[in-house]
Amino acid sequence: MKLLSMLLLLMLLTRVSGAACDIVIGSSHREPLTNASGSGIVDGLVVEMFHRIGHSACITPLPAERSLLNANSGITDGDILRVREVIVSGRYPNLHLVPEVLYPLPISGFTRRNDLQPKALADLVPLRIGFVTGWKILEEQVKAVEISRVRGVEELFALLAEDKVDLVIYERLTGQHLLEQLGIEGVRVVDPPLLVTPQYLVLHRRHQALLEPLAAALRAMKAEGGYERAFRAAGVGAPKFR
Amino acid sequence: MKQGSRLSFRLGRKLALLSLLIGLLMLPLLGGLALWKNYAAQMLLRSEQIDEIANASLPALREALWLGDNALVASYLDGLMNYTDIARVELRWAGEIKPSQVRGERPSSGESVLERRIPINRTFKGRDVVLGTLTISLSLARTQAQLRRDIWHILLTQLLEMGVLATLILFAYQKLAGQRLQAMSTVMDRYRAGQTDARMASANSGAIDVSDELDELAAEFNALLDSQQGYTDELRATNSRLSEEVAERRKAEESLIQTRDAAEAANRAKSVFLANMSHELRTPLNAILGFSSLMRREPQLTDTQVESLDIINRSGEHLLALINDVLEMAKVEAGRLQLEIAPFDLGGMVHDVADMMRSRAEQKGLYLQLDQSSQVPRYIFGDQARLRQILVNLVGNAMKFTQTGGVIIRLSVKQDDRQYLLIEVEDSGPGIGPEDQERIFKPFVQLAKVAEQKGTGLGLTITKQFVELMGGRIAVESTLGNGSLFRVELPVELADLPTAQPAENREVVGLAPGQRAYRILIAEDQHENQLLLSRLMDTIGLETKVAENGEHCVRLFQEWHPDLIWMDRRMPVMDGLEATRHIRLLPDGGKVKIVAVTASAFKEQQQEMVAAGMNDFVAKPYRFGEIYDCLERQLGLKYVYRSAAVEAAAVPVMPTAVALPADLKRELRDSLERLDSERIAVLLDQIGQINGDLAATLSHLAKSFNYPAMQRLLDESGDTGQ
């Protein structure tokens, strides 16, 4: 008993110091979902999930593709917020999916025009549309009179600011946060989101044994309300699971 | 240009050529080195070029790889291809997680490229993460083209350098050594030309300031010339002395040559004289012998007259033998000796000689042994008379010097590339010293003391000449006190058939019945000889006419048409040869038999006569039998002989020597062995006083030198005289 309490103390100290994580998870997302210090909304959820199964995890920001590549090649232990298709495609054979949706990512339209209220992708056809290149789902599904593809989100919003496009498509929370950061005014988010894509935590295959326990931990967090609280604490609305 | 300067230039040229040659030999090595250096520099440049390109593009590529953006990677690779000489770039993602990006073609087998493989890493969380590998291939085509251009450049440059170096060496040599050597050569030329004070001088024309080897050489050279001058003077004096001596010797030599020429001319004159003398001597001898023989046949002669005639005849025969001996030598010296080759009975001849000599040996208390190999052929081709003379000379000589023991005649054959007859005559005499062995074959050399000397001293000389003429060799082996061995080696040719032995000399007294009277013309200028021949013809009842000279002979031939002409060779007005030629051209001139009667002893003259158209030949002095034999040959005459008549009547009373006193017989035998014809004649005279018939028979035999028959007659008397 005495030994167990000593061990717990040691674990706690280790976690608090943050000096050594036994799990490193890459993240290519931005504030508020994730940040460089690993204290974003989703970062906190993932750290808690690992904590619940007895691991200390750190979140490290990486470019989107690199995060997958590193996880696949075992440089990192996993990647957060990935769609199921990443696993199904077979392009990253070493990655496995934690079978519980980590976050249903809303993809919304951003526009300066008040008259636009598209409800679905099909409503975009008569418009000039912009999005970040590499978003496969958008590249496949968006049909519009004019499509502009740009390398980054800053350029995307610049297009919008310069009125070169009618509407840009981007992830809702991050987009909104960025607009604030950049001080761009007159842009509104079109609700509801045009798409919601369920995102998962993926792990290198060496952690196959952790998949189920982590899913269980996430479900428990959702059931306990801790999951929702984490979003609320960040000042954004909790995601809805349909 | 003088020889000296040519020499120095040649040396300079050689030096320059040598350096050029060494340079050319070094060219591949030096050129190769330079080329390699160039190549290495080029490769270093290319390597640096790749590094620069890589360094310039790596950060961006690293970022693109980090981002995992293959499109971005592709665009960077496109950018890399814009660099000069980049043939190909390839980027492989670590773990092949994305398809490799390749730009450019893989180089063909002949194309050279410089390839650089650069791993692209990035530190992540304190560790090195390999993102991918960039491979850059740089084409070396331009580098190689540059190198090819450089080869010619380097070669030309080095050749130029060599040429310049060789020229510099030539100039340096000329400056440092050539001019001074040339100067030395000039001094030498001047010295040779007689300017004996010519010396190498320094710049200030004082003593040479020795600063290098050539100065040393010049100083030594001067010293040499100084000493040379002394030698030259000495040599000149010696040379002048020698010249004088040479001139004197030349004079002496010329005088010697003159003397020699005179001696040779005298010798030739002697030979000609001897030949002529023999002719001149034979002609009167012919008359002496002929007429004494004719007179001897006269039945009415008194015994004293017969004796006197015999003395005349024998003295004539002896004189003839002496003349013949001297004449043989004259022939030898004149080089006109010719062999008379005919088949003959070798065995018979050797036995005759041995028999003849044996009794003489026994007389002296010596043995004479004939040791004849069974392989010695009986009949051979050869000059019987001369071979006989060789044998008689050798055996006679051996006996002459041997006082105890005896003489062995050995006959054998030796088969070499051809067959040789070996005749060895070995005696147990006093032997011949080494110095005398050389001399004995020379003419007129006699080893006996002067008082004991006999004969002409020509025996061994003639023997040697005969042997050599027969193609053989004669040698002597002897040591003083141990006897001598004369060895004769003669090439021999076998004769198959024994030839008919000449008939015994028989006295012709007339023609056999039933033959016509042949007409015989005698062309002869000497009255004695005309008479002699006429008598001989008359004796047998032939019709004769005499012509005084050739012209007369031709006229008489046309008028009288003789059957045979005895033709003297030497005649006034027209000689025998010309007369013969004339006659042969006349009608019926081809039918008449013409026989030369000549005192010439030389064979070629006989051939000349045959060539002129003569049928036969009889030498003066002739025996009557020869004249009659010739008539028998030419006209087919048959004779009646006196001997046949005598034999028929006197067979029961054959002359015998039994009745002769033993002393007389022994002395005759001794004289026969010694071939002492003079003494034989005297003894025959004495015998004539005791037994006329015996003396006549012996005289008849002696006339024909048939000494063996005389020996046999003595032997048959039963008294060996011992």
Image (cartoon, coloured by chain):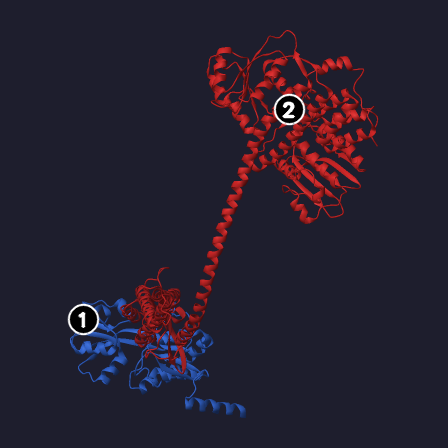
> Which residue type does callout 2 highlight?
Leu
Residue A32 vertical placement versus B594 (above, below): below
User: Which of A151/B677 is in front?
Assistant: B677
Outermost residue on the top side: it is B514
Instruction: Please state the horizontal and vertical placement of residue B269, each as a whole percent of the image.
Output: 53, 38
Label number found at residue B469: none
Chain identity of mark 2: B
Number of numbered tags placed on the structure image: 2
Whether callout 2 and callout 1 share a subunit is answered: no
Label number found at residue A128: 1
Which of the 4 image quarters holds residue B68? Answer: bottom left
Q: Colour of chain A?
A: blue
Q: Residue at x 83, y 29 (%)?
A: B662
- Within 10 angstroms of label 2, few (less than 14), some, or many (20 or more) residues? many
Which of the 4 image quarters holds residue A174? Answer: bottom left
The kind of secondary structure element at disc 1 is strand
Q: Residue at x 44, y 63 (%)?
A: B240
Whether tag 2 and tag 1 are in contact, CB under 8 A, the answer is no
Instruction: Please state the horizontal and vertical placement of residue B613, each as a whole percent of the image.
Output: 51, 20
Q: Colour of chain B?
A: red
User: Which of B246/B451 is in front?
Assistant: B451
Residue at which label 2 appears: B289
Chain identity of mark 1: A
Instruction: Please state the horizontal and vertical placement of residue B350, each as a whole percent of the image.
Output: 72, 31
